[in-house]
Image: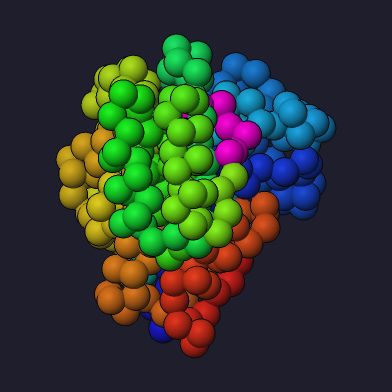
Amino acid sequence: MKRAYVFPGQGSQFEGMGQALYESSSLARDYFEQANQILGWRLSDVMFCGTKEDLTQTKVTQPAVFLESWVRTRVAGEAFRPDAVAGHSLGEFTALAAAGALAFEDALRLVYQRALAMQRACELVDSTMAAVLGMEDAVVEAICAEITDEVVVPANYNSPGQLVISGSRAGVERAVERLRQAGAKRVVVLAVGGAFHSPLMQPAQEELALAIEATPFRKPVCPVYQNVHGLPVTDPDEIRQNLIAQLTAPVRWTQTIQNMLKDGINEFIEVGGGGPILRGMIRKIVPAEVVLGEC
């Protein structure tokens, strides 16, 4: 059996996240305290005691989700033996660290820089995202392409019949209206800080690119299926460039899982305590006999 570990992104945070790990494992405590020291503030306090509103701040959410998932892989010890890894958006950084392509300290710093850069980009333009359910990807793509005087693009190909669009608020609102008229089963504007994975993230991409270029990357212990094309990568330079492109490119999650299946993966383990977020998407993509689990 070939096993892939998959890592969730922003949106998988939950109140009290990581506290049980901290209290039950000295190794986990070491990583939490190391993270606090690297960041210069006590992320763990916000994770354990913060409100839902506290945890939805991008500057908190991204390092918190990264840290919680990373610690789970370390606590698992020798049981963590991936044949492949992938992460959804932010989760790609966790996947890279878990596969040894990035050192923990470097990955955490990049994640925090990413969060701050994205927050600054969000403040430049009034923007948002919307989930489109029950419509063919090609139809969603065509409707977005028809809107040329505002920014609105496909952002997350989560599973067949579930695609998230992203862009300026005016562009997304116009697309939502047209998608409903075209017969989408449901269209929901999301409570997010801005237009992630769209051209509006260009300022954040330029800022983060400098940090990524300055960070050492190593060859991972297994293939990393990256968001920008859903294909396996092991070359450190290619990983670096795909990670930079990720901020403005769509997350091709459906294609990622389909490619993993073609390459013989028949077990998917979701790493994170926020519930079956990725497993729910994956179940809509894979045959019934494929095993889904959690770590």
The residue segment tinted magenta is 189-195
Q: Please identify the quarter of the rendering in which residue 62 is found.
A: top right
Q: Give left or right: position of 61 versus 134.
A: right
> Seen from this angle, which residue lies furthest bottom?
289
Q: Going 58% across and 32% down the picture, which residue do you hit?
A: 192
Q: Quadrant of the C terminus?
A: bottom right
Asked whether 210 or 164 is in front, the reply is 164
Q: Going 73% across and 26% down the picture, which residue do you hit?
A: 54
Q: Give left or right: position of 64 versus 214.
A: right
- Place of residue 40 in the rendered image (x, y in percent of width and height, measured from the top left): 60, 17
In the figure, 134 relative to 284: above or below? above
Q: Is 59 contained in the magenta span?
A: no
Q: Give left or right: position of 125 versus 53.
A: left
Q: Quadrant of the N terminus?
A: bottom left
Asked whether 186 or 159 is in front, the reply is 186
- Place of residue 137 in the rendered image (x, y in percent of width and height, measured from the top left): 36, 57
Q: Please identify the quarter of the rendering in which residue 22 is found.
A: top right
Q: Going 78% across and 30% down the picture, which residue do you hit?
A: 50
- Place of residue 163 in the rendered image (x, y in percent of width and height, measured from the top left): 44, 52
Q: Please identify the quarter of the rendering in which residue 59 is found.
A: top right
Residue 103, can we see it? no
In the figure, 190 relative to 70: above or below? above
Q: Give left or right: position of 281 versus 87.
A: right
Asked whether 237 or 181 is in front, the reply is 181
Residue 214, can we see it? yes
Name the dominant secondary structure of the magenta segment. Answer: loop
In the figure, 98 relative to 29: above or below? below
- Place of residue 210 in the rendered image (x, y in percent of width and height, measured from the top left): 27, 20
Q: Going 43% across and 65% down the picture, which residue do you hit?
A: 160
Q: Is 193 contained in the magenta span?
A: yes
